[in-house]
Amino acid sequence: MDNIAGTKSSLTWVVHISVALLIALWLFPTVGLLVSSFRTADQISTSGWWKAMVASEQNLILRAADPDEARVERNGLFVVEGKFFGDNADPGISAWGTSSRAVDAYSIGDVADLGDGETLELRQDGSYVWSGSEEQISGRGQRVFITANIPPDFTLDNYDKILLTGNNTDSMAKAFFNTLTVTIPATIIPIVVAAFAAYALAWMDFPGRALLIAIVVGLLVVPLQLALIPLLKLHLGIGIGKGYLGVWLAHTGFGLPLAVYLLRNYMVGLPRDIIENAKVDGATDFLIFTRIILPLSFPALASFAIFQFLWTWNDLLVAKVFLIDATGETTVMTNQIVEMLGTRGGNWEILATAAFVSIAVPLIFFFAMQRYLVRGLLAGSVK
Amino acid sequence: MHPAIQGLLTIVIGVVGCVGYFYFSNQILDRFIFPARGANAGRNINRANMVRPWLFLLPAIVALGVYLAYPVVETLRLSLTDRALDGAFVGLANYSQMISEQKFWEAMRNNMLWLIVVPAVSTAFGLLSAQLTDRIGWGNIAKSLIFMPMAISFVGASVIFKLIYDTRPVEQAQIGVLNAVWLQFEGGPGSFLMLKALPALMLLSFAAIVAYAVYVVCRPIVAGNRERAHWMTKALQLALGGLGLYLAALALLNVLRVLGADYAYGEPQQWLTLPFWNNFFLMVVLIWIQTGFAMVILSAALRGIPEETIEAAIVDGANPFEVFFQIKVPQIMGTIVVVWTTITLVVLKVFDIVFAMTNGQWETQVLANYMFDKLFRSNDWGVGSASAIVIMLLVSPILIWNVVNARREMR
């Protein structure tokens, strides 16, 4: 299409803009989570994260201090004094009100008349005086609707809480190490087992080889849902029970078909001359494998490793079935997040931070080893 | 023992054990069982070489057998027995119990919806973004950003999208993007344009694209000029054509529904509890993840198309759309099918997203979550296994197709 005269320049602009839009659309959700993880609970619940980047007009709903604790009697009137926005000297209040129907009824310095002598005054620095009779200044604090220009403000407190100081239900530290404990052996062991099998399937001649390859291709798509009950029964039966060993073995088993398939396809493509020369020189199969095949297959090994790593790190089902027991000591991050969704559904600062902690490591791996991931994908599905 | 040390130990035992096994079993074979010396040296070498492949394969075969092949058989057996009756054989009782449950049919219906929508939309978006990003200088950066969600777990993505779908009472500021956008519409001409005219237009163009694709796919049959076409190809073309026509008709029908729809303007919506539509809000999560995958593979395929075919088409006066749909797409059809089936497999097994976002409430149940529910909440292994077998049956056409293809390639 590029070489149609006269159409190129206009079309190129359309392409640039559509791609930019597409990327914006695709990044938007993740950025929302990232930004939210740096905001306090108050900030998250009072304004959308997209307003956090720039100083923005926000409508806040605040409440004066609790009269039962803060009120003092002065000249026969009961008065509550306090200050919104903490130590901030100029929070940029542009308008305020005392009812949801008229949130911008007053400006700074006005005294709101709440009826029957009850008044509320709000000053520029956010301090207020709420006064009235004993009856009026009681119950809950007066609601104040403030329109203010809030500057961007980010905090690392959430990460501190999630990773270092949080209590048991909020802390991701243990789950992080548990996930790591699951992931590393579950990535390395299938590679070793599969590499040998792939070599046999690629370079050794024996009856039944084609059938075995066909079986591997078939097993590639067997849904692991099928394996849950029989294997759980087996693990409980032979005494492995629920635990790390079980989940390592399960991940090894489930990862093997892809590993064998990817590695075999790669090894078949290695030059025949090298292997035959080595054989003529008297090398055994074991030597050929360890000295020639393994080093040459590094790209394929790397692409399977990143697949398996992403899959085991992100897995929820296998961990839930084979690892996490009633005590919850061995919980992994995905499971911890799902539990938080249940117990702390509204606490977005916790959820967002926890989720970001769990996706940060795969994202780093992803960008570092993207080349191998793409290569593996292409080898695994395009023929 | 600390799990980290245990893990380290397992790595060492696993790796050293495997390598040691391969090394020593080869040594034993060559030195003691069939030594390459003495009177039968030649015959022994041959025999050793016949045994050796199986030494290399043994661990993998054992693991595959125990962890994948045996469970298939065992699940089939379990689906015919009842755990409460000490594993007595009950025939098809579990299956009949399952199909009498409304939740199961809900899961089936939703799974079918997922099966149609997610692969289609992901592949279409993937094709679109592959075609677009291949034509610009910063395409690789664009690609890796669209590809990025692949690295994010389904659970992480669920949290991300739950934030987008979040709902606050009407008097509070909305923190979910979707509701914030939704509240911008108040029923005026702008709303009509965005919520009725635009979707109607999109449905119309979808119908047009599908109809055009049907035309392209089915033309060889009508024209009858390709005698050599296999009957299976023809059947596939017909099936695709039928499906396409159905989808196009459905889209046209929904144009009317969209135009006549009565929206609840000004009220924040609980997106995940709207029956039927909430399925689509869940599907968006998977589409968001899978589009990158489709894009990467399709982009490689697009780049593999010989330049001459495109140049010839342009010289013959084809417009850009004709070049794309009639020259490029047919040449990468094989890859599109592979992408489609791969995403189909992911969809059939989708569990985490539904589990984390709605847990099958509000009519969003899918088979994999239904099965998990049966297994670990109702503790009903029989029905759980039966639903696993249903998933297996849905997967098996792809399994057979893959195996047939793999065998054909090896010949």
Image (tube, coloured by chain):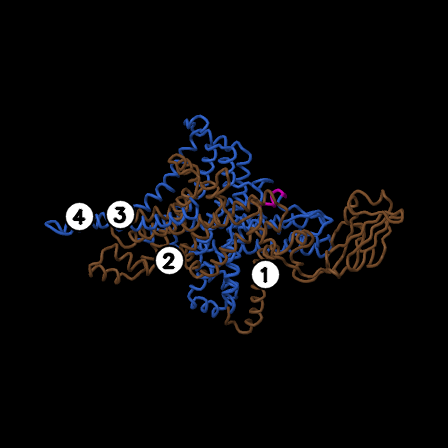
Q: CA distance from mark 3 to mark 1?
A: 53 Å
Chain letter tied to blue: B
Up/down of B99 relative to B271, above or below: above
Mark 4 lies on residue: B34
Image coordinates for residue A263, horizontal then vertical, percent: 35, 55
- Mark 4 near mark 2, Cβ–Cβ under 8 Å? no
Which hue is chain A drawn in? brown
Marked residue chain, label 1: A
Q: Are marks 2 and 1 on the same chain?
A: yes
**Dot label at residue B55:** 3
Tell me if mark 1 has few (under 14), some (14-19) or many (20+) residues whose alpha carbon lies within 10 angstroms of its own: some
| Amino acid on which disc 4 is placed | Phe
Q: CA distance from mark 3 to mark 4?
A: 14 Å
Q: CA distance from mark 2 to mark 1?
A: 32 Å
Mark 1 lies on residue: A24
Marked residue chain, label 4: B
Query: Which residues are the magenta region?
Result: B273-279
Magenta stretch containing residue B276, yes or no? yes
Give the secondary structure at mark 1: helix
Q: Residue furthest left?
A: B39
Give the secondary structure at mark 2: helix
Mark 2 lies on residue: A300
